[in-house]
Image (cartoon, rainbow, N blue to C red):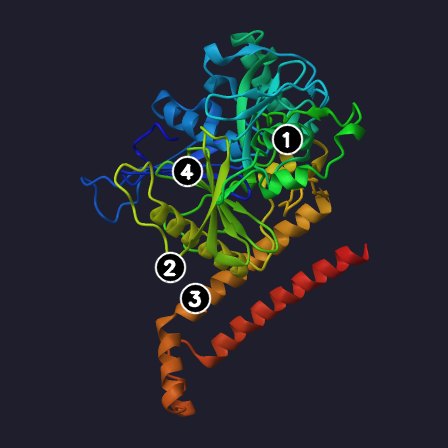
Amino acid sequence: MEPDPGVSSVSMFEDESVDVRYMNGSQLQVSPCGGEFLLVKASDPSRHPLQPRERVRQRTRFTISTYKELMTAALAFRNKYASRPYLPQELVPAEYKTPFSIDSDVMWPELSSCEAELGPGGETIIRSQEGRAALMLSPSGEEFSVEFQCRLSQFQNHQHSAESFSRDVDRRAVSEQHPGEKYQSTTVVQHHSCFAYAPMWCYPLSLALHHWTTRVSQPTEVGAVGASDSAQAERKLNMSDISSEERRSCLPQALALTCPSPHRHRWKSKDEDHPAELMKVMWCQGVTYRILSGAVSVIEVSPGDGSVIRSNGVLNTYFTHHRPELQSGQVKEISYHLNNLPPDVVGQAYSICSIVNRASRILTCYDQAKQSLTLPAAPSCLQGAIEGKHFSKPAVLEGNLAPVEHHMNVTEREENLSDLVAAEVEKIKRFNFLLENSHLQRSEKACVEQHRPPAEEETHEPVSESSIAEALQRTSRAIQEIDALVSATTLT
C-alpha cells in the first residue's frame, strides 16, 4: 500500500478482514476470506446531502477494471499479514505466475550444512533445500519475512451437494477460458513478528537467529547489544536433536476461490466507534503497527528501516527501540518514555515522537475495545473455509521461541448456537442503545435526581413505566433463552 499516495490508512482485524481508508473519503472493505469487497465511494458534492453515498459490492475475482488496481493493492496487504492468502488468478499478473509444484512441503537444511546469506539491508536469509521458500530475518532480529511459492486459489474439492451444481458451472467456465492456469502458482510474501508466528516457521527462524546471533555477538559498546531477548531464547534450543520431520514445513495454502459462508460477511460503517472485531495490524503514513495479543497486550512498530519499536508489556508507557547499525552489525536498544520523547531532527527519516504517540493511542484504544467486547465474536467466514473445520491460531511468545498452538474444533452445532446467540445479543444491544440514548429517558433520569414525580404525571409520558418494564421482560426472556441453549449444548 505504500506506493499509493491516495491511501490514508489500512487496517486488518483479528478476523482477517481489511479496511482501507482513502484521502478522498472513500472506504474499501474486504471480507475475511478475501472473496468479496464493499466500496463506499466518497461523497459527491453535486448530490443532495441526505442522499446516501454510492456503494459497490462485488466478488473480488470478478471486479471490473475500474476497481482492479484498488483490489490488487488491498489483497497484497491482506496476504502479507493473513494466515492464508487469497490468490484469484484474475488478479495475479501473468508475469508473476509460474508452474506449480504438487508438493507443498519444503525441507530446511541442517544447522551443520546451513549457509545463511546476508541481504543488502543486513537481513539474514535462510533458503529451503528446494529453493521454493526463504526466510529473511530483519537486521534487528525482532521480525522476519517469508517468501514462498503458493498455488493459486482453486475451487474446493470436497463440497456439499447443495453447493456442487453452481460451483461446477463456474469451474467449467474458468477451465474453458484459461486452460492450464489451475496448475499455476505465484510468489507470496508474509511478514511476522519473532514473538508471534505460525509453528511452521519455528525451525527456519531458529536457523536464522543462530546465524544472526553469531554475527552480532561480538564485544559491544555501552548501549549496544549483541543478542536480543529472542536470540537469547534461541540459544536454549538444542539444534543437534532436530529430526528430518521437524525440518519439514508445510507451506500455507491459498484459500478457496468461493467462500463457503458468504452470509457471514459483515460490513463496518465508516464512523463505527465500537467495531465487532479487534484490530490486528494497521498501516499509516509508511509505518506498520502490529498488536501482539496476550495476557498483556503489546504493540510492535515497524518504521520501515529494519528497526522495531515495541511497548514494554505492563509498563506500556515505556517503549524499546531495537535499532541496527549496518556498519558495525550491532543492535542498539534505546528506551523511550511517553513523557520524555526525543525531539525531531531535521533530515531524519521519521519522527520518533509521532510514531510512539500514535502507537500508544492505538494500544490504548485496543485495550479499551478488548474490555468492552466481553461477548465472543460472531463466527467468521474463515472458519468454514478451512477444510475439516479445524484451524490453529498462533499465540504470542513471551521470551520463548517455542511455538504455542491452540487447536479449536468448530462443529456445526456450535456454529448454529453461535448464530442464535449472536442474533439475540444484537437484539439486546439495540434495545439497550435505544434505552440509554432516548431523550425522554434521559429527561426522566434528570427528574429523578430532583424529585419523584406523582404517578398521575407519569401516565402522561410518551414512554410509560409499564412499556419499559415490558421491554425489560423481553430482554430477560432473551437472556434466559440463551442460557437454556448453552445448558442444552453442555449437557449433550
* Residue occupying the far left of the picture: 46
The residue at the point 46 percent across, 37 percent down is 307
Which secondary structure, mark 2?
loop
Determine contact: label 2, label 3, CB under 8 Å: no
Determine contact: label 1, label 2, CB under 8 Å: no
Horizontal side, residue 344 vs residue 280: left or right: left
Toward the viewer: 278 or 387? 278
Judging by the rendered image, the residue that carries numbered circle 2 is 339
Which secondary structure, mark 4?
loop
Judging by the rendered image, the residue that carries numbered circle 1 is 205
* Looking at the image, residue 487 lies above or below residue 352: below
Find the distance from the CA under tag 4 to the CA under tag 1. Answer: 22 Å
Label annotation for residue 434: 3
Mark 3, mark 4: which one is toward the viewer? 4
Q: How crowded is mark 2: few (under 14 residues within 10 Å), some or many (20 or more)?
A: few
What amino acid does circle 3 point to?
Leu
Which secondary structure, mark 3?
helix
Q: In which quarter of the image is residue 449?
A: bottom left
* Looking at the image, residue 217 lies above or below residue 361: above
Which secondary structure, mark 1?
helix
Pinpoint residue 431: horizontal percent, then vertical percent: 48, 65
